[in-house]
Image: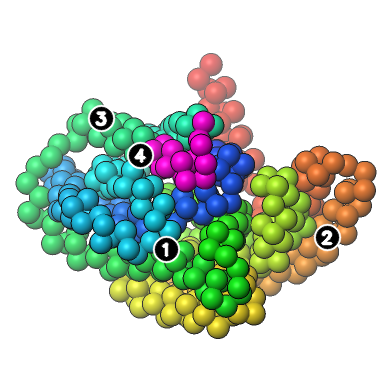
Amino acid sequence: MSTNIYKTTAQVTLFSTIEKTLSFAYRIILSRGIGAEGLGIYQIALSVFSVLLTAASSGVPVTVSRLLTKQNAMGNTAGKNAVVTAGIVSTLAFTVPACVLIFAFRGLFGAMFSDERCLDVFLIILPGLIITSVYAVMRGAFWGDRQFMPYSLIELAEDALMVITGTLLVTGAADAADGARRAGAAVFVSYVFSFAASLGWYFRKGGRLVAPKTQLKPLLSSALPITAMRTSSSLLNSLVAVLIPFLLVKMRGVTDGEAVALYGVAAGMAMPILFIPSSLIGSIAVVLAPELSENFYRNRTELLKADVEKSLKAALFIAFALVPLLFAAGGTAGEVLFSDELSGRIVRNCCPMLLPMCLSMMSTTVLNSMNREHATLVYYFFGAGAMLACIAALTPFAGIYAYVAGLAVNFTITAALNMRLLKKLCPGVKTAGYAARCAAACVPCCAFGRALMPLLERFMPPAACLFTGGATVALFTAAALLAAGAWSPEPALRFIKDRAARKKKAT
């Protein structure tokens, strides 16, 4: 990867990290402001909304990005505008009728919620389906034209607005249900902003809406498999959001409120911590997807192979760098951030799932960039079926841990199948040796962290222990991975040196 790719990846990652930090802080605010029950209501409503949003537009950004890359290579400006217009038309054709039908038959639609309070939150967010699906098309346009700075700024501003608005609104909430409704209103406000800002930028930079006829068929042909996979994922999440409380009530003997609260702890507190790598992998994927697509379409075999290998190694590095930190400090993090011991235990006990999760996410992105959407869709269904079977079988014995176990099984299956296909498509891609070196460095780091944290807890309050212990484990892990040859400071040093040289030349 060129220096420019490293620079752009670092830029997108920085903005994404700030954005996810804001979102994470917002989770803490919500958990304290509306409690686990309110967070569970909000999470269930949001998961159902995500199904519709995914069905409307999830495959569009990647496809728009890839088709724009192709049109840029051909120098076809009219074709680029047609791609964007086709994306908007395709999303509106689904979202407008869907919103009208749901509002018209909301009584029937509400029957799918196990808790009727979730319907109120869902209906508050629902109008945002139309506008945020259009913004999804704009995201793809940003990626395809490699306009990563405006994309990053809009994403960050959207999240910041949601956090500020939500914090102000939930402060005056009367109860858990009222707080969940107010949090839903904050989501809608943020969608309005990103819609207006992205369209404004698109037209300001010369974008136009033109006849989309020539690009509708290729866009739908490529987007539908991705949309089907991601819609299935959202449906699965919504099914799980309903299924797990039901199973907990029937098989574990807890009350409805306790079941919703347990799901709120797992999905609303523990999962945001365990899914930290998704934001890092997402940043890398956003930058690399156009590059991978271009090398694939231009038959640049060696460059494609190199990018695939580096992408997979990046996923492995992220996983092995974070596992020791969460294994050591996960329990303390749950107590400090959420005042909830169970969320910390889930993070600490289940952090090894980061390895298959990171590989699954990155390999899926790589395969989609190489026009293998149909294969990743089939692989997803294998993993999803195994996840549901795992949850059904383990809930009577493991309780809420069955949810995380199911996720781990899902990621393991999809990662294994993805890697098998990648080996066929790109012979010679080598990651086993790198993974072994990372694993060898990770084990003593986990042991060091678990020995360090109890010592610090004797002399420090929890917050100071989390900060000091987390920083120490992170530095120890970075040093161990450096010694194992898992990473090198050379690209960063080269970037700093080149930047200093440019400044010196300019003066």
**From mark 1 to mark 2, how far is it between C-alphas?**
40 Å
Q: Amino acid at mark 1?
A: Ser
Question: Residue, x 36% and y 34% (percent of image)?
Answer: 189
- Observer-side mark, 2 or 3, equals 2
Q: Main secondary structure of the magenta part?
A: helix
Where is residue 357 drawn, in percent x and y?
54, 66
Query: Would you name the residue on which mark 4 appears?
Result: 188
Query: In the drawing, does residue 226 fall left or right of residue 394?
Result: left
Residue situated in front as seen by the camera: 139 or 507: 139
In the figure, 443 relative to 153: above or below?
A: below
Query: Would you name the residue on which mark 2 appears?
Result: 450
Query: Would you name the residue on which mark 3 appears?
Result: 200
**From mark 3 to mark 1, how far is it between C-alphas?**
40 Å
Give the crowd class for mark 2: few <14, some 14-19, many >=20 residues within 10 Å.
Answer: some
Query: Would you name the residue on which mark 1 appears?
Result: 114
Where is residue 306 drawn, in percent x and y?
48, 63
The image's mark for residue 347 is none
Question: Residue, x 37% and y 73% (percent of image)?
Answer: 376
